[in-house]
Image (cartoon, rainbow, N blue to C red):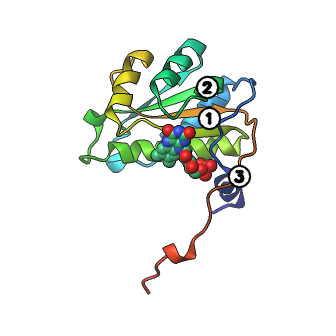
Amino acid sequence: MSDRILDAIKNRRSMRKYTSDPVPTEDIETILTAGMMAPSAMNARPWEFVVVQNDDIKQAIAAKHPFAKFIPQAPVVIVVCGMPEKERAPGLWPSDCAAATENILIQAQSMGYGTCWCAIHPYEKRGKDLMPIIDVSSTPFCLIALGVPNDTPRMRGFYEPEKVHYLK
Ligand SMILES: Cc1cc2nc3c(=O)[nH]c(=O)nc-3n(C[C@H](O)[C@H](O)[C@H](O)COP(=O)(O)O)c2cc1C
């Protein structure tokens, strides 16, 4: 693994405070490219992405999510949506969406942006509440807040050697 990728992985942390700096469209597209380059079971790619930059819609999303009250201050919210009808291996669309989500988080970090993954799936009510707000018929998987960081939260990830089991 290159040092650059490991640095992005190590330095990523959930960001819940953002500056008001906008995220240029070309950066959003680069970040979404990383999402769409994620692996998916049998290459089904059962996802789509809603990019929310409208303040009223961000407020409406935050009002429906119990743990995403900070969402309106992020300049961009990406809603990762799954398309269960497109999955090719039964039951794996959430795994595919999770892979896309993590790619987005790491790519954004490598470009100097902060992110926070907020769960929708498997909480059905959260998804159903969200669908009319973002006007999709696909299944909301998660929210990703995206923007220029305005905080330095402590790093929470760490290596735990006791969780590694070598079978030689
Ligand atoms: C599946 C998943 C769901 C999460 N849901 C939320 C959420 O609803 N709200 C939130 O503020 N953070 C959420 N998080 C962020 C976690 O709280 C965070 O990743 C964890 O505390 C570790 O901190 P770090 O991301 O800074 O390493 C979620 C993370 C994951 C992976």
Report the mark closest to the observer, 3 or 1: 3
Quadrant in the rendering for residue 23: top right
Helix, strand or loop status at disc 3: loop
Check disc 1 and report the residue beneath it: 30
| Residue type at the position of mark 3 | Arg
The image position of residue 100, as x and y in percent, is: 48, 43
Which mark, by number, is residue 154? Answer: 3
Check disc 2 and report the residue beneath it: 76
The earlier-in-sequence mark between 1 and 2 is 1
> Marks 2 and 3, how far apart in space?
23 Å
Image quarter of the N terminus: bottom right
Residue occupying the far top of the picture: 56
Camera-side residue of 14 and 101: 14
Q: Residue at x 64, y 27 (%)?
A: 74
Image position of 151 with respect to 134: above or below? below
Quadrant in the rendering for residue 116: top right
Image quarter of the C terminus: bottom left
Report the mark closest to the observer, 1 or 2: 2
The earlier-in-sequence mark between 2 and 3 is 2
